[in-house]
Image (tube, rainbow, N blue to C red):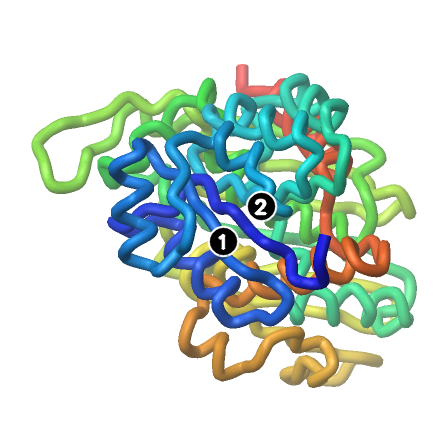
Amino acid sequence: MSETIRVGVIGLSASGGWAAQAHLPALRHLGGFELTGLSASSPQAARAASEAYGVPHAFDSAAELASSDDIDMVVVTVKVPEHHELLTPALHAGKIVLCEWPLAVDAVEAAALAEAARAPAFVGLQARSAPAIRYLRDLVADGYVGTVLSTTMVGSGGTWGATVDPRNVYTLDPANGATMLTIPFGHATDALTFVLGDFAAVHSTVATRRGEVAVKGSDAVAPMTAPDQVAVTGRLADGAVATVHYRGGVCAGTNFSWEINGTEGDLLVNAVGSGHVQLESLSLYGSRTGVPLDALAVPDHYLCVSEAFARKSPRAYNVACAYEHIRSDVAENTGLAPTFADAGRHHRFLDAVAAQPMP
């Protein structure tokens, strides 16, 4: 493989979507990657996307893309229920892989995918790559708050409220693996454990308070069996107490707040729009020895891509940082980007949370 990693994206569509909003701008901005090919929902859709974005190769299928000698790395950006089928040819071909989170519909399927990987296999838990989260981790490790006593996180899911966009109706059924528990709560708790360490013990209350929701732009309603309330209390490996509560929809008050309280100080992370920490712009504040909280600027060396790019393509920013970490891992074995093994552990944690519903 050359120094430039040739990328094929499964799920890049001319009509938009996550791949077009995040992966395409990130790959175009970064050096060291070349977007060489794509596949979409049909050969016709792939050709349309190839023409729209100037991508050289439009493949008729994910399997054809994965087997191509022109592709070094396969990126999967489709809905969760399709991940296993579309990843399997790339894993068998020994290609580098990046798959959007959630990796799988459950921990069993995630474990099977991790077992099948023969080359570096990464998962899109890109909140870990956010400069504010990486700086927060180092502040804690360097003793900014002293010994961590407790942490409290509250977030809003954005979706799973009173209404749902037609394209997101599938997220209302937990069988599809793309719920508030797995997506915003999943990204947020991965960031929490990345900063503070894993849960050693956990107790959860999971409930569905809205049994049906209105479908936007129509008179239809859709049943919701996925949880719209997830509350977790637990103990982290170092003994600190953790509390996390995610609510469906958005809130007129707090949509994301995360406090870390210690013997020597406190840290606070805020976001305005939603609890999707992997997407939102994060504000960081700190206090030591009882002085009022003050804004903490993230040092420049944490900014893996330019702030100008962040302003131009905010949804692509953390994804671009994740690609930078992947490039470092592939070239230098640095271990910065989350892998399928990390995804498997996190899926097991989420399955444990889901196993304790409200009576």
**Left/right of residue 128 with respect to residue 248 in the rendered view:** right
Which residue shows up at 48% across the image and 67% down it? 28
Give above or below for 186 relative to 315: above
Q: Nearer the viewer, residue 339 or 279?
A: 339
Q: Position of residue 208 (x, y in %)?
A: 42, 26
Question: Pointer 2: residues within 10 angstroms few (<14), some, or many (20+)?
Answer: many
Looking at the image, tell me whether mark 2 or mark 1 is earlier in sequence order. 1
**Left/right of residue 48 with respect to residue 65 in the rendered view:** left
Which residue shows up at 25% across the image and 37% down it? 44
For the residues labelled 2 and 1, say whether their Cβ atoms are less than 8 Å apart: yes
Residue 231 in which image quadrant: top right
Instruction: Determine the residue located farthest toward the front in the rendered image.
Output: 69
Q: Position of residue 202 (x, y in %)?
A: 75, 32
What's the residue type where badge 1 is placed?
Thr
Q: Position of residue 132 (x, y in %)?
A: 66, 70
- Asked whether residue 186 appears in the rendered view, the answer is no
Question: Pointer 1: residues within 10 angstroms few (<14), some, or many (20+)?
Answer: many
Q: Secondary structure at mark 2?
A: loop
Which residue shows up at 84% across the image and 35% down it? 200
What's the residue type where badge 2 is placed?
Ile
**Left/right of residue 347 with respect to residue 261 in the rendered view:** left
Which residue shows up at 56% across the image and 46% down it? 70
Q: Position of residue 16 (x, y in %)?
A: 30, 52
* Distance from Cα at disc 2 to Cα at disc 1: 7 Å
Q: Which mark is residue 36?
A: 1
Q: Quadrant of the C terminus?
A: top right
Q: Which mark is residue 71?
A: 2
Residue 61 in which image quadrant: top left
Q: Nearer the viewer, residue 13 or 297?
A: 13
Instruction: Determine the residue located farthest toward the top in the rendered image.
Output: 359
